[in-house]
Image (cartoon, rainbow, N blue to C red):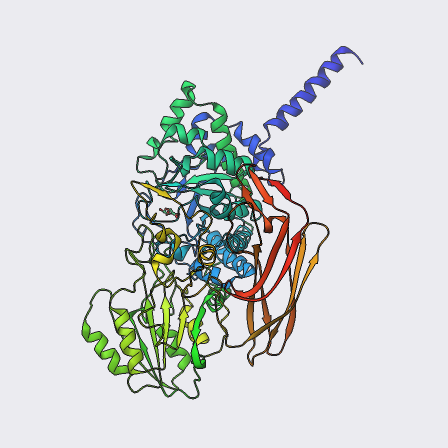
Amino acid sequence: MRVIQWVSAIVAITTTFAAADDLKLYLDPTQPVEVRVENLLKRMTLEEKVSIIHADSKFTTPAIPRLGIPRRWLSDGPNGVREDVGPDNWKPAGRTDDFSTWLPAPICLAASWDPDLATAYGTVIGQEAVKRGKEIMLGPSVNIQRTPLCGRNFEYLGEDPFLTSRIAVGFIRGEQSQGISSCVKHFAANNQETDRFSVNVEMDDRTLREIYLPAFKAAVQQGGVLVVMGAYNKFRGQHCTENDFLINHILKGNWGFQGLVVSDWAAAADTTEAALNGLDLEMGTDKPYDNYYLAKPYLDGLKSGKYPMATIDDKVRRNLRVMFLTHAFDPPTDTGSINTPAHQATARRVAEEGIVLLKNDHDTLPLDAGKIGSLAIIGENAVTEFAHGGGSAAIKSFYEITPLAGIVRRAGGKMNVVFSMGYSHDHPSPDLADRAVKAVAQVDAVIIVAGLNHSKYLDTEGSDRKDLSLPYGQDELIRRVVKANPKTIVVMISGAAVDMNAWLDQTPAIVQAWYPGMEGGNALAAILFGDVNPSGKLPATFPKRLADSPAHALGNFPGIFGTEHYQEGVLVGYRWFDTKQIEPLFPFGHGLSYTQFAYSNLKLAPATNGPLLTVQCDIANTGRRDGAEIVQLYVHPEKSSVARPDKELKGFAKVFLKSGQKKTVAISLRADAFAFYDMTKGGWLSEAGDYSILVGASSRDIRLRDKWTLPQTIFAEEK
Ligand code: GLC
């Protein structure tokens, strides 16, 4: 071939590649994500790169029309899509198209112990987020309940890392299945609201890895969560949102997280730390957008060489990766949906499965509608709407069925229902209690709907409770009502334990209803009248007194001189109560049913590949009603080289049984079920030796037990 032909061929090939290289591959949804990321990254100017890693309004990042980068919307929250605010402040935007389904508070979802239901829950939010045009949804919130006083306990998933992890993973799989991103929060150790912007948390590595990180690790490695939100507080002296150890070493190093880290709103605090310690998206800073820590100060530092260009490219890669994975660039395949009958049904099902029957002496419940001629409903919480409260988890709900509305609807005019306020959060008056006591004297049954609300220093973001007590004189009201009519049921609306000592013994039935969502009144009525058999189980210990709780027994809450030492270590919740042999009011995992379940035939079968052991047992419904039981599996080390909790939840199974039916439940255990975090080795040590395998209906209602020997010690690197 003559030279000219060679040269022409080479030019043609080069031109083709150049043309191909110039193809906007990033706009082709059939291209691999990483190809799209690199193809777009190289086209961006430095200014454009910096522009997309910080906000341009309360809940958005800017578009770059030149490149077809869309404006990106983020939104709260963990139990529904929040109403729009701003654009540059927290005031409602005044829209009429930003109503959403208000799902039961996440603590209620956790009380269902149903990861599949958590997937349905997340799917509802994901579908509504698509409809509302949101790419990143700011939930689930997975901070461990270290104290019953934390104002955001209603938003979290309880005291146990294993249960929290299972529910969070289910939630994320559901929400992200809709083509948007979840955001697991608040990373990490954000377990109180007191001084939340400044408190410095100190704990040892074992406590961190065994208790406060597992749900985040599961969210990343099992849920595939694309966004993690850095918390407000400090950890070991550095803001969590810009924390080298938590973000660079653990999240992105050990766990291999490839998504993006977003700040909590106004949690960023320093350009250099944000630049170098893994913050990828800055939101909510109290500054003009161009003066954000990752805006002009960072741009100037990149230009001056103070910050390596590699830092901005990594941040932008992570943002673009999430955009491509959430199809922000691609035409939506689904336009989403809002407040459909299916969404309403999920909201109701979560309430039905999450409401916990705490006490039911003499089969007080369920009420027999055929025999009840008159019913008194007492309490401000029977008529209060809760959707719009609690802080960033608030929802502009299409509707809300209150307890009174649900009960009246269920009564269906077949009985005489009266209501008396009994107490009031804003117009307290002894007359209210007097009138309530009169109202109950002659009726066949009484339902008091008591508890907390989303007022400051109760169940709300930004403050913690002062104590466990019921506000507004409710203790005295309940005592007087129960005395006037012994057939009284107390329904508790709250995100965590309250002090019940003043009336517990005199009250035959108690129901924990949490904040049960927009279908809550219907779900509660269905349970009270027996249409639904309650199956919820407590995701957190209810203590008899606050001083019995570890964070309070050791006097570390809410921190001394700005630092909070988690001195109780891994002994959080039932780990503390059971190890210290302190009797709780109601234990972790507790919840009654209208039927009874028998446990039998425990078998421990050594497994071969993967799991070490399969635990099998039979569960029979020996009562007259169909129902669901949550079989819980705890592991107790007979001996250990370190101090370990008396028992730890390592498996559970929710099984539905018709009356008289029996099923076999099998739960597999891997080495990690026997492990503790060995700080000297920096990994997970499952020591050879004897372990008790405990199977029960709660952490203190163990029905079956057997011993198993781990033949050899197993060590697993943290990864
Ligand atoms: C809040 C919360 C966080 C929320 C964010 C945006 O302060 O801590 O959970 O997602 O700000 O509202």
Lateral position of residue 232 relative to residue 660, left or right = left
- For the C terminus, the quadrant is top right
Which residue sits at x=34%, y=52%? 461
Looking at the image, the residue that sits furthest to the top is 3
Q: Residue 231: horizontal and vertical position, in percent? A: 40, 42
- Of residues 465 and 405, which is closer to you in this image? 465
- Of residues 476 and 271, which is closer to you in this image? 476
- Of residues 193 and 707, which is closer to you in this image? 707
Q: Residue 237: horizontal and vertical position, in percent? A: 38, 35
Looking at the image, the residue that sits furthest to the right is 1
| Residue 336 appearing in the image | no
Which residue sits at x=44%, y=47%? 569
Snapshot quadrant of residue 677: top right
Q: Is residue 224 above or below residue 401?
A: above
Q: Is residue 539 above or below residue 258?
A: below
Lateral position of residue 674 relative to residue 82, left or right = right
